[in-house]
Image: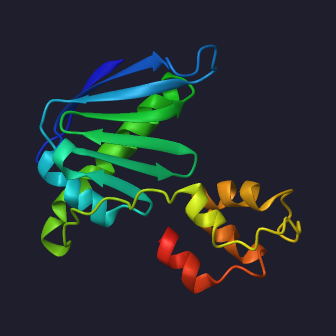
C-alpha cells in the first residue's frame, strides 16, 4: 500500500499490505500487515502494561496479542498484524492509529512499569463443570451444566447466572 515515515519515534518507517485471510476463505475483510523497519521487541512489555486489557504477552516468543473492540492485533518484533480491515482506507487509518499508539507508549516508557506476564491459560471445561451443581436445572439459561461450563471458559462474566456456583471457588479456577 505504501511507505510512511515518522521522525523522532520508535517506529519511524513502515509499509502496509492487505492480505486475504487463509483461515476465513471468502471473507469480505482482510488482514492488515504493518511491516516495521525497526525492531519493537523492547516496547512489547510496555505495550503489555499500558494497553487496555485483555492482552496476552509471550515474552520468550516476542509476541503480544491484543483485542480492542472488534479488532485483533498481533505485535511482533518487526510487524503488527490487524484484523479485520475492510479496505485500503481503513487500513491507512488503522496503521496510522496503532503506530501513533505504540510511539506514544514508548515515549512514556519511563512512567510505565513493564509487564512480562502473559494471560493465564483458559481453564479446562471439566474443571469448571466440577464446580457446577450438575443438575442441568437451566436456571443459567443453558440446556446443561456442561454447556454452561463451556461458555464460562471464555466468558467469566456469566458466572453469576448460576445461583449455586461459588464465586470464590470459580475465581480459583478461572482467574
Residue 126 appears in the picture as rendered: yes
The residue drawn where x is 12% and y is 38% is: 39
The picture quadrant where one finds residue 157 is bottom right
Using residue 159 as the reference point, say whether residue 153 is left or right of it: left
* Nearer-the-camera pick, 63 or 171: 171
Residue 9 appears in the picture as rendered: no
Display coloring: rainbow
**Location of residue 106 in the rendering, given as x and y in whole percent from the top left corner:** 18, 57
**Location of residue 169 in the rendering, given as x and y in whole percent from the top left corner:** 56, 81
The picture quadrant where one finds residue 80 is top left
Using residue 17 as the reference point, say whether residue 149 is left or right of it: right
* Nearer-the-camera pick, 150 or 117: 150
**Location of residue 84 in the rendering, given as x and y in whole percent from the top left corner:** 53, 33
* Nearer-the-camera pick, 100 or 26: 26
The image quadrant where one finds the N terminus is: top left
**Location of residue 23 in the rendering, given as x and y in whole percent from the top left corner:** 52, 22
Using residue 34 as the reference point, say whether residue 53 is left or right of it: right
The residue drawn where x is 57% and y is 76% is: 170
The residue drawn where x is 50% and y is 27% is: 89
Label total for image: 0
User: As displayed, is residue 156 above or below residue 150?
Assistant: below
User: As displayed, is residue 106 above or below residue 49?
Assistant: above
Amino acid at each position: 500500500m505504501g511507505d510512511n515515515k515518522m521522525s523522532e519515534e520508535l517506529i519511524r518507517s513502515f509499509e502496509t499490505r492487505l492480505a486475504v485471510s487463509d483461515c476465513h476463505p471468502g471473507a469480505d475483510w482482510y488482514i492488515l500487515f504493518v511491516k516495521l523497519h525497526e525492531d519493537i521487541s523492547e516496547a512489547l512489555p510496555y505495550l503489555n502494561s499500558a494497553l487496555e486489557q485483555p492482552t496476552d504477552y509471550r515474552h520468550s516468543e516476542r509476541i503480544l496479542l491484543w483485542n480492542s473492540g472488534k479488532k485483533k492485533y498481533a505485535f511482533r518484533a518487526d510487524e503488527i498484524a490487524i484484523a479485520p480491515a475492510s479496505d485500503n482506507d481503513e487500513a491507512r487509518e488503522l496503521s496510522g492509529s496503532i503506530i501513533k499508539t505504540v510511539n506514544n507508549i514508548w515515549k512514556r516508557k519511563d512512567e510505565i512499569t513493564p509487564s512480562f506476564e502473559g494471560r493465564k491459560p483458559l481453564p479446562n471445561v471439566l474443571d469448571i463443570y466440577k464446580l457446577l451443581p450438575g443438575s442441568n436445572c437451566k436456571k443459567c439459561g443453558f440446556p446443561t451444566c456442561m454447556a454452561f461450563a463451556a461458555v464460562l471458559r471464555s466468558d467469566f462474566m456469566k458466572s453469576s447466572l448460576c445461583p449455586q456456583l461459588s464465586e470464590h471457588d470459580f475465581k480459583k479456577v478461572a482467574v
